[in-house]
Amino acid sequence: MDFKTLSAPKEGLAAVAADALLLVVTAAAPTEALPGPLGAALKAAVDAGDLTLKAGQQLYLHRVAGVKAARVAVAVAADASVAAWRKALAAGVALLKAGGTRHLAVALAGAEPTDAHAEALVAVVADQTYLYRHTKPSAPAASALAKVSLVADKSAALDGGLRRGQAIAAGQTLARELANRPGNHCTPTHLAAEAKGLAKAHGLKVEVLERKDVEKLGMGAFLAVAQASHQPLKFIVLRWNGAAKSAAPVVLVGKGITFDTGGVSLKPAPEMDEMKFDMGGAAGVLGTLRAVAELRAKVNLVGLIPSCENLPSGRSVKPGDVVTSMSGQTIEILNTDAEGRLILCDALTYAERFKPAAVVDIATLTGACVIALGHHRTGLYASTDALAGELLSAGERGGDLAWRMPLDAEYDEALKSSFADMGNVGPRAGGSITAAKFLQRYAGAYDWAHLDIAGTAWKSGAAKGGTGRPVPLLTHFLLARAG
């Protein structure tokens, strides 16, 4: 899709040449502030009770006299903030995406949009027009929308926001597409192939470690999870070198469980199909690498993806088994459904060889995080206040919010084991925190953060599907690091 800026015509918004005009107005803005036929049409709609100037309200008008665009959609925002703009855009685009509109012009009435507004516009349009069709030939026809113009007085100042938005949207769409594919399509081998294709298209370096390589490294925790499946494990290493060779890289580690039954500690059958989304961390890493490479960001970045399935079979690891991780620490596997931390801990140890500036792991790790935070904010754990602050700020800029959770030493007591250096689970209370404390035991050599995306990586119900989060958060984090 083509995103451009468009200088506001001297004659006003009524003269904008497009198939449709989406006008975002704020709840506090009087309709009289819009001159000409658009203002008159809005005032008439308000007077007639067809539109209320309250956040969330919208109205469609067809062939308004004196307005060049055949279709006009009005969406009311609480204010001119980027967050309110996003919500109003989503409502407005929903009114227009299914029609015959090929060129959509968008304007913020009574205020000048910023490059953050421009980025958000791309994100909303990409989200509203995304359709999964890989295994669904009966999916509805794609939206006719091919061009979106952001109308502004200082349009040139918005080009950077549109460019950034397009790169992040492309990365987020890649992550969504991978997450949405069923487990018999998106296998560890498929993820490795996607990584190789990404590397070839965007100038990345890629290496895929096979079982024999993982065995040689001593990744006993990763191997334990993978041993029951007929699908071969893959350990994917991707590198983007955008800064000087001497600059320490940031390492992203993404959980790549392409299907999770829970193993011997079998999950309940209802909604188990959603466990295809358990590779959301891996998808997020691939999407972020794509965005960073498209933007040619001046940062060195390493993506690590340990990928396998977690299945029950005669070869499965059992509750009570003890394995030795790459770090040499032993783990009593008390619950085989706490497998994500087992594959991540070996990847966190592997990350040490890059002498990283920081390491961030991303995982659909715990249902406990969903109970704590619901589906709006990602759970954030960090070893330093500075790193936590960077990630929280990046989430604010990208509209991809996180919430910092505690890492108090007292929570570590829950992981004690009589038969190994640690158990892989503690009691139910504080389950997301004890999972993070487990990972922290493998991340002492560098600044580290953990993003628990179990509540934000996908949606259930009628809108079931991957969200592509936290690609916006991670991309803004890396862009800030790149300066």
Image (cartoon, helix red, strand yellow):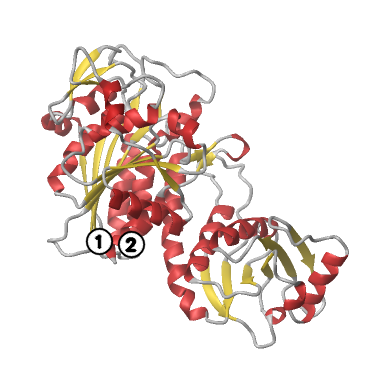
Front one among 313 and 225: 225
Front one among 328 and 432: 432
As helix, strand or loop, the secondary structure at mark 1 comes to: loop
Q: Which mark is residue 299?
A: 1
Front one among 123 and 132: 123
Judged left or right of residue 455, residue 337 is left
Does 426 appear above or below 166?
above
- Quarter residue 92 falls in: bottom right
Disc 1 to disc 2: CB gap under 8 Å: yes
Q: Is residue 63 visible?
A: no
Residue type pointed to by label 1: Val
Tell me where residue 350 appears, x and y as whole percent: 17, 39
Name the residue tied to disc 2.
Answer: 479
Q: Is residue 25 visible?
A: yes
Q: Quick one: quadrant of the C terminus?
A: bottom left
Residue in the picture at 41% in, 23% down: 429
Mark 2: few/some/many CA within 10 Å (<14, 14-19, 20+): some
Residue in the picture at 47% in, 78% down: 157
